[in-house]
Amino acid sequence: MEILRTVEELRCWSRSRRRAVGGRAQRIGLVPTMGALHAGHLSLIRAARAASSDVAVSIFVNPTQFGPQEDFARYPRSFDADCALARAEGADSVFAPAVEEMYPPGAATFVEVEGLSDRLDGASRPGHFRGVATVVAKLFVAAEPDLAFFGQKDAAQVAVLKRMTADLRLATEIVVCRIVRDADGLALSSRNAYLSGEERRQALALSRAVRRVEEFVAAGERRSCALIAQARDIFAAEPQVRVDYVALVDWATLEPVETAVVGSLFAVAAWVGATRLIDNAVLG
Ligand code: AMP
């Protein structure tokens, strides 16, 4: 497994791998991450391994997607362990640039997906999706991947990035992978490492709320107000958890919908202590 540090190295790696080998066209798969890899990330690498001839995993804690009061400085970083995990899942390269490599001095170019970037997480994290879209666009331009793998866990991010790739007419196909959870239902997240034992217990309110809504949909409830009320009841039983949003939206536009249909996104975000967590379900 190669460790790549510069955009030029990533571009050369991708282009050299893409050249047809023995007449067989190569498919480059990219898995963008911020490191602190867990089983959710590994599921993306596995999906990439299964669908691509060559897999690059990027590990970059992207400063532009963090607000000034957010956890950029203390975000968990575990590069050596991450590389061992990526290698064990069959990654062919890890791209781990310095901040100045992705944002050269004087960098003034950003990618803004208008409208979508202000909804759900974008509403409470101004500038977050501008940072995400910008860094992912840079990764796509450098790696020229055929496929890029993202988790449904960050469902609003998926909507923003699908819009971006469509708008910029990029050739990369976005593949969305299901949410990986702990045995008790908590969606895996690098930020779960911040939780105390008691906070981790409280954090189960998110997955419980999502599951409750899925159960009500399975039982025939479709009204947004009723589904949101069910989720809010779960949060009300855990008063230490501060709800950011509970929403039923169209997954493509992130606009609220009155009635759930197949493919609607039910999403929640909440603060557990100082840690902001998210969870969701795509309704069947
Ligand atoms: P992050 O390192 O948090 O930026 O996440 C990198 C990628 O892993 C994103 O596409 C996330 O959606 C995805 N991811 C994070 N947590 C999970 C999870 N529990 N299940 C599946 N994918 C996940």
Image (cartoon, grey):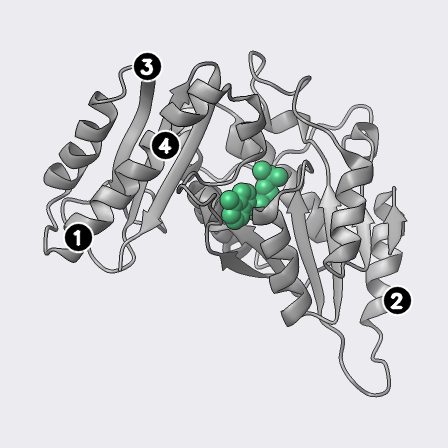
Disc 1/disc 2 C-alpha distance (Å): 49 Å
Residue behind mark 4? 204
The spot of residue 94 in percent (x, y) is 80, 49
Mark toward the start of the polypeptide (1 vs 4): 4
Q: Secondary structure at mark 2?
A: helix
Res. 17 in view:
yes
Disc 3/disc 2 C-alpha distance (Å): 53 Å
Q: Quadrant of residue 284?
A: bottom left
Residue behind mark 2? 16
Q: Amino acid at mark 1?
A: Val
Mark toward the start of the polypeptide (1 vs 3): 1
Q: Amino acid at mark 3?
A: Gln
Residue behind mark 3? 240
Q: Residues within 10 Å of mark 4 (few under 14, many from 20)?
A: some
Q: Are marks 1 and 2 in contact (CB under 8 Å)?
A: no
The spot of residue 16 in percent (x, y) is 88, 66
Mark toward the start of the polypeptide (1 vs 2): 2
Q: Are marks 1 and 3 in contact (CB under 8 Å)?
A: no
Residue behind mark 1? 217
Q: Amino acid at mark 2?
A: Ser
Residue at the image position 16 percent from the left and 36 percent from the top: 230
Q: Secondary structure at mark 1?
A: helix
The label nearer to you, 3 versus 2, is 3
Q: Amino acid at mark 4?
A: Leu
